[in-house]
Amino acid sequence: MADTTATTNTVQPPPVINGFPRLANEPAGQAGAPPPPAWDPDTERAPEHALLGSLLYAPHAFDAVDTFLGARDFSTPATKAVFTTLRELRRAGALYDVAALPTQQAQLQAAEENRSRLFTALSNRSYSDLPVGDVGEVLAQLTAAAPAECVPLRGIYDPAAQMRLARIVLEASLRRQLRSMGVLMTKGRPVVPGPVTEQAAGPSVQHLEQISGQLRTMTDRLVQAVRRTEVVGTPPPAAQQPHVAPAPSHPPSPPSPPAEQQPRAAAQQPAGTQRARAAMTAGRAGSSRWRLPQPLQAITQRRLHRAERHLIHLALHSGPDAGRLPTEVLDLRPEDFTHPVNANTWRAIQDLRRQGLPINYVSLHLRTADPSWGHHPTLSARDLGRLAQPPELRPERVARTLQTVVTAGIRRASRSAGRAVSALATPELDVRSALDEAQRQVSVLTARTRTAAAVHHATQPTQQSSPRR
Amino acid sequence: MNEISREQMAELITNGTATPWTHPLGVEGDIPTAATLADTWYVVLDGHDHYTPAAADLAAVLTSAHCALAAADAAIGAQHVE
């Protein structure tokens, strides 16, 4: 077809070293050392090299690429010639679809065969008269941009990626062409988005509002669980239960009335309980937002501290296998505790449990006195000595303690989620961190709700076995 | 000369009479200042400040470029559908 030099007329498959054909002008004596990849990562030519290299090993996409891309769209005579030659080889069925072969060895052999055929066709100028220059160097650039070893990883050998590469080549070609014809170019919109504006944060706000709704739903479920616990945990009639002196401001608890007298009996309940039920009823009827019942709204720091100490007390007397407490209680995390001293003590208890050591106030004291503990504030020896006595083990008391700790945790989570939502109103908004924080709080809340539900379920049989009327 | 100022073209684009070129080209996202008005390409050439009707060869390039980009988008979309 076209005349060639004496060197290129003696067509031999190019010697291949480490996947790269040896450069044509490389002395034979240096065949032992692999040549460095001579790929020039020029921003204009890099997409062309990547596209041609991928089409060399995965020519299946040629059918679609050929509909909108032509040899005229490439920037150099060499790449124009390679594209034309590859297209004609593909039409002649002379190229393997390397990615379709089953084994890596077969793929590498097929890739080498494709390179050899392209080398031969380019050297003979079988399909294009355009000057290619050093054929070996051109092939080296293609194989460096699209290594045959990466075919199993797909990447640029994926047809969708090949289409996008072809479009990039087309865009560059059109830009060159229009500029050469004197058309004024303007800068388009920036690829990298600017600072997040209030309008752009709209979807994130919706997402956070959805999370906030889920938080309210979970709070609703927890309130229902607490109400059931409250009903079950109501002291039985005085005739069947030791009398507990009521608080001075409250009248003595009367025996439970028959079913038909329930409304009147409700009027005789302690004022706090009535207020709680009234608040819940008003919350349901008046607005869509839930309000926690009054007993849950009155979690003082003292009450919370007492509840956390009670949990520690229970853990210290849970026995060698911790079998006297539900696993859900022992699975509470230090972060679920409000007071740092209690949280650190709980961490020490978990350390002992993980190490399989007995959990009691002596082992706890030794653990916290160890230099590796790092002087974190924990219960003093005097406080631990007070916990030597057996703790309160009644199921309803344990449920109330756990309810207090979990409710306090939920409130912290709700406050954090609320802060995350309100943070969206500020212009210097970090939507990503706010969203992450809200999602973290939701995860924590979900775990706590599960814990409360599991403990409630565990205490249910014991409570149901006691007489309720 | 059928020159159209940038402000007039912007108004025509706003009211839907003219259609601007919106495809960014190349890695830098350059957009040619071109628009079609009544099946005629108008462009702003370097050193000018007005839209003028494109010459025949330039109009052919713009039309074929538009068709090629649409075909590329169709090919990319077909890959995603598969």
Image (cartoon, rainbow, N blue to C red):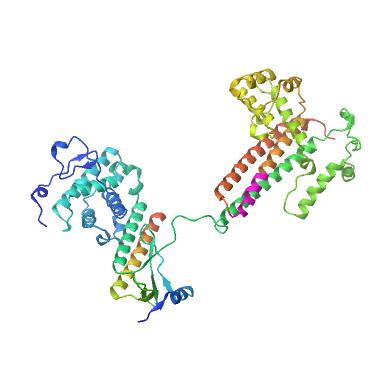
Secondary structure mostly seen in magenta is helix
In the image, A465 versus A409, the foreground residue is: A409
Task: Determine which quarter of the picture holds residue B60.
Answer: bottom left
In the image, taking residue B71 as reference, residue A364 lies left or right, namely: right
In the image, taking residue A314 as reference, residue A69 lies left or right, namely: left
Figure label count: 0
Residue A308: percent from the left, percent from the top? 72, 31
Answer yes or no: is residue A304 visible. Answer: yes
Residue A50: percent from the left, percent from the top? 30, 50
Question: Would you say residue A113 sits in the magenta stretch?
Answer: no
Q: Which residues are magenta?
A: A414-427
Q: Quadrant of the C terminus of chain A?
A: top right
Residue A56: percent from the left, percent from the top? 26, 49
B53 w.r.t. A213: above or below: below
A120 w.r.t. A356: above or below: below
Q: Quadrant of the N terminus of chain A?
A: bottom left
Single out the residue that lies furthest toward the bottom. Answer: B1
Task: Determine which quarter of the picture holds residue A28.
Answer: top left
User: Residue at left 61%, top 41%?
Assistant: A443
Single out the residue that lies furthest toward the left. Answer: A6
In the image, A281 versus B33, the foreground residue is: B33
User: Residue at left 89%, top 36%?
Assistant: A253
Residue A116: percent from the left, percent from the top? 19, 46
Answer yes or no: is residue A96 visible. Answer: no
In the image, taking residue A277 as reference, residue A155 lies left or right, namely: left
User: Residue at left 32%, top 68%?
Assistant: B64
Task: Determine which quarter of the picture holds residue A254.
Answer: top right
Question: Would you say residue A419 sits in the magenta stretch?
Answer: yes
In the image, A345 versus A460, the foreground residue is: A345
